[in-house]
Amino acid sequence: ALAKLAETLQAEGVTVIFADTSASDELAQTLAAEVGDIEVVTLYSESLGEPGSDGATYVDMIRANAERIAAALAS
């Protein structure tokens, strides 16, 4: 299944994979390494970030996610 997904990502020209900060991104990193030239960007989705992080409050979390998505898609 991973090989088929890697083929699809290559065929479609995918340049970024979004992962969740509250879970391991090991699978996303493995997939990115398999395909090559894919960035893995973590987003807050299940919980806020640690105090002092860019996802410490709900507003910070939404802003951080929007900025990360926009930057990843613009590159």
Image (cartoon, rainbow, N blue to C red):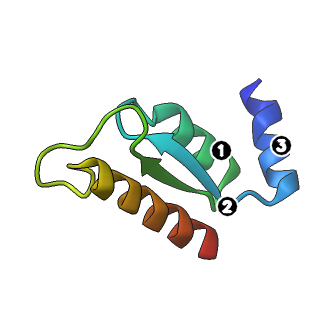
Secondary element type, mark 3: helix
The residue shown at (30%, 48%) is 58
Mark 3 neighbour class, 10 Å CA radius: few under 14, some 14 to 19, many 20 or more: some
Mark 2: secondary structure:
loop
Q: What residue is shown with label 2?
A: 15
- Please name whichever residue, 68 or 75, is drawn nearer the observer in this view of the structure: 68
Give the side of residue 71 with respect to residue 57, left or right. right
Residue ID for mark 1: 34
Please identify the quarter of the rendering in which residue 27 is found.
top right
Q: Is residue 33 left or right of residue 11?
A: left
Residue at the farthest right position: 11
Position of 61 relative to 67 (above/below): above
**Among the two numbered marks 2 and 1 on one chain, the one whose residue lies closer to the N terminus:** 2
Which quadrant: the N terminus?
Answer: top right
Q: How many circles with numbers are drawn on the protein?
A: 3
Circle 2 or circle 3, nearest the eye: 2
- Res. 75 in view: no
